[in-house]
Amino acid sequence: MRELRKALGEMRLPDVEAEIHFLATSEGGRRSPAISGYRPEHAVREDYITTGVHDYLDVSEASPGDTVRATITFITPEAHPATLWVGKVVPVQEGSHVVGYATITKIFNDTLQAAG
C-alpha cells in the first residue's frame, strides 16, 4: 500500500473508512449539512487532533442527525502512527466543538494501525 501511495504522489488514497454519526442540531451538532470534501478535525488521540477530508460513499451530503459511510484522508497520518483500530470511535470536531463521531470500520493506511 505504501508503494502505491508514493507512486500516486499528490493523489493520496484514503486512510480509513468509517461510519460517521453527525449529532442533531438539538444535540449541539451542525446547523447545516456537511458535503463530501468537508474538512473537520479528528481527535485521533487524547493529545492529538488532525484535520481529515471526508468523502461520503453513498450520499453527497450528511445532514445533522444522519449516519453515513465515508472515507477519511488525514493531512498528516505519519504524525500519529499506530493510533487507530477497527471499532475505535473518534470525535469529529469543528475547533473544540464536537459535531459527531466516526467509528473506524476499515484501515487502509498501515501506518495508522495500532498493534493488536
Image (cartoon, rainbow, N blue to C red):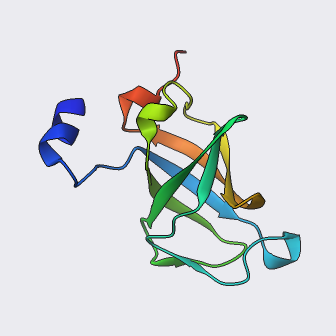
Q: Nearer the viewer, residue 71 or 46?
A: 46
Residue 60 vertical placement versus 108 (above, below) = below
Using the rendered view, name the quadrant where residue 16 is placed: top left
Q: Nearer the viewer, residue 87 or 74?
A: 74
Residue 31 vertical placement versus 113 (above, below) = below
Q: Nearer the viewer, residue 74 or 105?
A: 74
Left or right: 31 in relation to 39 = right
> Furthest residue to the bottom?
32
Using the rendered view, name the quadrant where residue 55 is placed: bottom left
Name the residue rendered at 18%, 47% in the picture.
9
Name the residue rendered at 76%, 67% in the picture.
23
Percent position of residue 35, x then y:
50, 77
Quarter of the image for the C terminus: give it. top right
Query: Total of numbered circles in the picture?
Result: 0
Left or right: 65 in relation to 87 = right
Quarter of the image for the N terminus: give it. top left
> Furthest residue to the left?
7
Name the residue rendered at 52%, 15% in the picture.
115
> Furthest residue to the top?
116
Percent position of residue 7, x then y:
12, 41
Percent position of residue 51, x then y:
53, 54
Name the residue rendered at 86%, 70% in the picture.
27
Residue 48 vertical placement versus 38 (above, below) = above
Left or right: 66 in relation to 61 = right
Whether residue 27 appears in this view of the structure is yes
